[in-house]
Amino acid sequence: MIDTIKHVAITGGTHGNELTGVHLIKHWSKCPEEVDRNSFATELHLTNPKANQEVRRYIDQDLNRQFNARDLKNPDLNGYEQQRAKSLNALLGPKEDPRVDFILDLHTTTANMGMSLIFNTDDPLVVGMAFYIKQKMPEAKLFFNPCDRMKDNFLTSLGRLNGFLIEVGPIAQGLLNYEVYSDTHTAVMHALDYLELRNTGQAIDLPTQMDGYQFIEKISLPEDSEGEITAMIHPNLQNKDYEEIKPGDPLFITLSGETIPYDGDAAVYGAFINEAAYYDQNVGLSFMEKISINLMNDSPL
Amino acid sequence: MIDTIKHVAITGGTHGNELTGVHLIKHWSKCPEEVDRNSFATELHLTNPKANQEVRRYIDQDLNRQFNARDLKNPDLNGYEQQRAKSLNALLGPKEDPRVDFILDLHTTTANMGMSLIFNTDDPLVVGMAFYIKQKMPEAKLFFNPCDRMKDNFLTSLGRLNGFLIEVGPIAQGLLNYEVYSDTHTAVMHALDYLELRNTGQAIDLPTQMDGYQFIEKISLPEDSEGEITAMIHPNLQNKDYEEIKPGDPLFITLSGETIPYDGDAAVYGAFINEAAYYDQNVGLSFMEKISINLMNDSPL
């Protein structure tokens, strides 16, 4: 449990071709009153400028996989994003004793994930933020991905409290869409309002439990012996993120048009279905399980 | 007018992150019977392998703007795509007296363009192909862009007859979508069937006129004095490709949420609305006019 939130960082462009966060950060830099709150300071950072310049997810490696405490200390990791991670650790961290209390990192996806709130800790302040935003935006989905903060490789794990990704889709890489931009803007406003309410000791009426989803595994696209993909997401599954996939349901369709069903024994839920960024590893989707997320009791700040 | 079609090339990956054409070419390389016809030879080419490897539109410059006859002869144009253009000119052309009669180039767009058939000549064989495909796929749109073949900078202008782009959307860059893949496959089958019917002198019942669209101009996204975009496509316009834009209709919305209307005097039609590839030049959409396209009389081959 954390006493109070004094320093909040909002970060965008961690993946350089996800322009929504980039332009929100630029917008707020010109209109800081939108992200100012009385009880804490808000800072704004574009985290991967070179990848953003080239409108690519990354230059050398995915920046949002570089924040494991051990990797941050490894001087042999010298790629562009590995160096960016060390710079960001100096700016926002250090990971072992961070200056910044909380990081909100803004992402988009080509998958039909709607408004997805991704958080990696069961800390009641963070779970409460997810619940609060979902109260205001009931269509939001809670994507709970518990991970020890020191081992977590997301940028958000640089904060004193393991923070929060706002992931909105579907949107192609390299462009802006007003609906995605506006929804992301709204979610950030709610997140900051929530922190302000917490900091100032105001009552927040939240449920003790909400439905969410937890990652099981990544599922690869079928490929041939040369590593070339031989199938794509089945049209019945496209855009069906967070819906149930039952044994026997169509999963993929080959380039020749043959359906490949899900051959597992238990129903799962899909997420990141047909995310372009995952084609570099021939990943087609993630399997998730539906869970109940509990908001643990904590005394108000 | 051309006597007969003996050599057809189907090309994909001209923009390296448009994977539909890439995987159709790979598929047909393994299943050539799908593109074989009796009266002509079909060849398959991946035209921009390095950009495809890196899942980028291009390495140095847009390959599909490099086929002007003068540029093909300019030894000072040495970028990767400028060199690819010269190689393709040797493979398929030369432009002044091409070996290949007809090129079908496969593209996708992030805009909601559906099945768009783009052709740059009023030659009745080519217009007839567009009409034939639209008869079979009534949702297809005809995008007529007349251009002298020697000055044309599209890859398709390397063919003896200025050929044909099949442009399908919306789809994000860097991924496959079964519907887009399947529609592109179907359109290519119709195109090849049409050439077979023409070559073998069979009667093809086509109308003499169909509606289409002709390019007027590209419209820039609003930008500030530093060249940063300050607005995006208005939500009322998003996905409304080929629909009418009247004076006063919302065109853009600023990052702060203010609407910018269309201030022209005459109604136009939009196309390539929010195409990610055009953000490199801050282009938001194209204005088109609606036209009637005539199929000129020609004697059957």
Image (spheres, coloured by chain):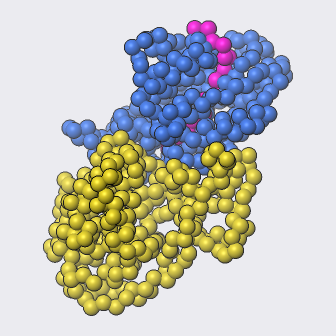
Chain colours: A blue, B yellow
Quadrant position of residue A78? top left
Q: Quadrant of the N terminus of chain B?
A: bottom left
- Is residue B186 shown left or right of residue B141? left
Which residue is at the front of the view, A295 or A108? A108
The residue most toward the top is: A96
Say above or below: A291 vs B229. above
Quadrant position of residue A62? top left
Which residue is at the front of the view, B22 or B15? B15
Image spot of residue B294 (x, y percent): 43, 86
- Please provide the residue range marked out in magenta: A96-111
Indicate whether residue B285 is drawn in magenta. no
- Residue B14 visible here: yes
Residue at 62% in and 47% down: B227
Image spot of residue A77 (x, y percent): 41, 17
Quadrant position of residue B105? bottom left
Say above or below: A125 vs A178. above
Residue at 41% in and 69% down: B118
- Residue A178 visible here: no
Residue at 66% in and 35% down: A25
- Is residue B170 shown left or right of residue A131? left
